[in-house]
Amino acid sequence: MEPAWKTMIGRQLEASINMFGDVLKQCPDDLWTSNLWLDADMPAGLSDFWYVAYHTLFWLDLYLGGEVEGFQPPKPFDLLELDPSGLIPGRIYMREELLNYMQHCLEKCNNIVNGLTDEQANRLCKFSWGKITFAELLLDNIRHVQEHGAQLRMFLGQQSGIHSRWLV
């Protein structure tokens, strides 16, 4: 794969992960378990700050591998997020656990992007929602991390006046 493309994809993916981590670090303790959409008709827990953060990191990790088969997140996380019925973990994940998961994802990201070949980039990845090349899946992964990072940042801004900073 062209070194320039690997550099661009890697830098943008890393920046989105770092900005996501920044919002996790900025969240006040009293908002960690708060519901992002207080009036939304969502099952209990699915819109809590900590859960949206966990959901984002789980799928970031899975998509960095490009397939569900054989995927195993690091401990203490499990595969419950794959359950289509929308089950949430039996306990709240703490900030430090999710920051460690984020670090795991950053390292995985760097290893994958640094070793990316044309063959790997063009590999077709199949999921229940469709098929996509691995290179496009990396770009889609950036969008997913940014989407939820923006939700969390907006919530922190509304609830406590915390503003995000742009990281490159």
Image (cartoon, grey):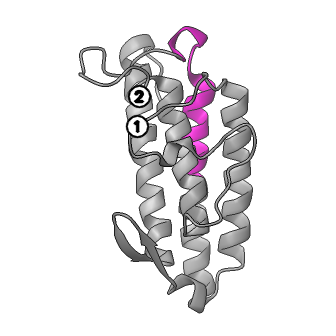
Q: Is residue 95 left or right of residue 168?
A: right
Residue 115 drawn above or below residue 52 = below
Question: Closer to the N terminus: mark 1 or mark 2?
Answer: 2
| Place of residue 81 in the rendered image (x, y in percent of width and height, measured from the top left) | 51, 43
Residue occupying the point 24% across, 15% down: 39
Q: Is residue 111 visible?
A: yes
Quadrant into which the N terminus falls? bottom right
Q: Quadrant of residue 5?
A: bottom right
Above or below: residue 125 compared with residue 73: below
Q: Mark 1, residues whose alpha carbon is within 10 Å: few (<14), some, or many (≥20)?
A: few
In the rendered structure, which amino acid carries the disc numbered 2?
Leu
Q: What residue do we see at 51% from left, 16% from top?
A: 33
Q: Which mark is residue 50?
A: none
Mark 1 vs mark 2: in front: 1
| Residue 86 numbered tag | 1
Q: Residue furthest bottom?
A: 119
Q: What residue is drawn where x is 57% and y is 58%? A: 62
The residues tagged by marks 1 and 2 sit, at their Cα atoms, a distance apart of 8 Å
* Viewer can see residue 166: no
Residue 107 belongs to the span the image colors magenta: no
The residue positioned 41% from the left and 28% from the top of the image is 46
**What's drawn in magenta, residue-wise?**
15-32
Kindly identify the amino acid type of the residue bearing the numbered disc 1: Gly
Residue 122, image x, y percentages: 50, 87
Q: Within the magenta stretch, is there residue 16? A: yes
For numbered disc 2, what is the local secondary structure? loop
Relative placement, left or right, of 76 versus 21 is right
Secondary structure mostly seen in magenta is: helix
Residue bearing the label numbered 2? 46
Residue 146 as seen in the image, left or right of residue 27: left
Residue 101 to residue 125: above or below: above
**Mark 1 vs 2: CB contact within 8 A:** yes
